Amino acid sequence: MIPLEALELFVIDLPLVHPFRTSFGEERVRRVLLVSVAGEGAVGWGECVASSGPWYSYETVGTAFHVIRDFIVPLLRGARLEHPRDFPALVAPIRGHPMAKAAVEAAIWDLFCRLRGMPLWKEIGGVREEVLSGVSIGLQDSIPELLARVREFVGRGYPRVKLKVKPGWDISVLEAVREEFPEIELQVDANCAYRPGDPALPEFDRFGLLLVEQPFHYEDLLEHARLARTLSTPVCLDESITSPHRAREALELGACSVINIKQGRVGGLTAAVEIHDLARERGIPVWCGGMLETGVGRALNVALATLPNFSLPNDISATDRYFREDIAHPPFALTSRGTIPVPEGPGIGVEVDGERLRREAAATARFGLRR
Ligand code: NPQ
Ligand code: MG
């Protein structure tokens, strides 16, 4: 049985090295919620991928704090878990709130693996010791500024670039990027910014893109299916895939031919692996998305992306693409092969700077888990 003795929550604000802008807003500081679960002298860590506001999804740092404190902790008190995979059933009575659940599940996976002296990536059946890296570049004020950013990241060795697009910031941008970089692996992410019938959509086929990510509203699987039938560029879903159930629906409808997997968005690592397996059975490639994670969440993404069907480059960049000083150590760095190496240590393989967390946290809470 997994020894569950105490759960702690920490909210911390980490300044980003560069503002990150999407079709739903701009972030200059990453407000993060970290979860630790302690037992038998070991501590496991999880990061909640919710952000400060309900823009990417309805969850926020505030709602996740509330749901963990008032609903997940009471279910966890005295709970008997043989394996982290038993956690989703325990929290199933709570409807929704996948990011809150995922953060606690992640801390339990890390604790479980650390107690066994086992790296997490091996425990879930990973097959590689480095994962393909990629960089996501936010919306910019002008095309010259965007080109300078692409130049910078290509120069640092990123083998794949993802551009944020929205109506009015799409075709002219792609023409300019393709003119200077005719060969780089390129893909676009609209974060739901388009309406069906937008004249830019069929134009995406001119640019040799790896995929187009989440063009339409997150609830609209049918319009994605319609687009997927007419576009030769693969359609990938992100925001729409909120569970294994929804992934099955999307694949059945032909709404996508690629899936972006984020363990937080789908309710945890167990659900993420389930979606990976389902996609694999159907010949659908997957890749790991990013949520501006600290080293805690980044390490979990790296472990997840070692699974066999993660065959496209991931939104897993080096630590210094986002933060000057991470809360977890050592930082992740890019290899000359355009990959991120998988840490060797037990659990997620990074160590959290607990002293700094306690010193700088904007909020903390501690809960005993024994009956
Ligand atoms: C995506 N991420 O794939 C997301 C969206 C995103 C790396 O492109 C704060 C917290 C700001 C989470 C901005 C990337 C965010 C965020 C964008 C997630 O759609
Ligand atoms: Mg996305």
Image (cartoon, rainbow, N blue to C red):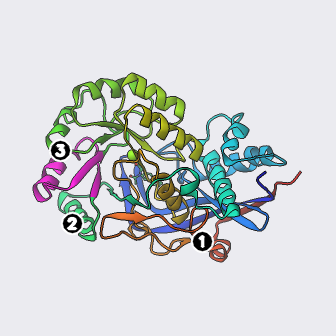
Disc 3 target residue: 208
Magenta residues?
A: 160-188
Asked whether residue 176 is drawn in magenta, I would say yes
Front-lying residue, 1 or 296: 1
Left or right, 41 with reference to 230? right
Q: How crowded is mark 3: few (under 14 residues within 10 Å), some or many (20 or more)?
A: some
Tag shown at residue 151:
2
From this view, report whether residue 6 is shown above or below residue 24. below
SS type, badge 2:
helix
From this view, report whether residue 134 is shown above or below residue 333. above
Residue 81 lies, in percent from the top left, at 76, 46
Disc 1 target residue: 351
Left or right, 133 with reference to 67? left
SS type, badge 1:
strand
Mark 1 Cβ inside 8 Å of ligand 1: no
What amino acid type should be assigned to the residue bearing mark 2? Arg
From this view, report whether residue 109 is shown above or below residue 327. above
Asked whether residue 318 is drawn in magenta, I would say no
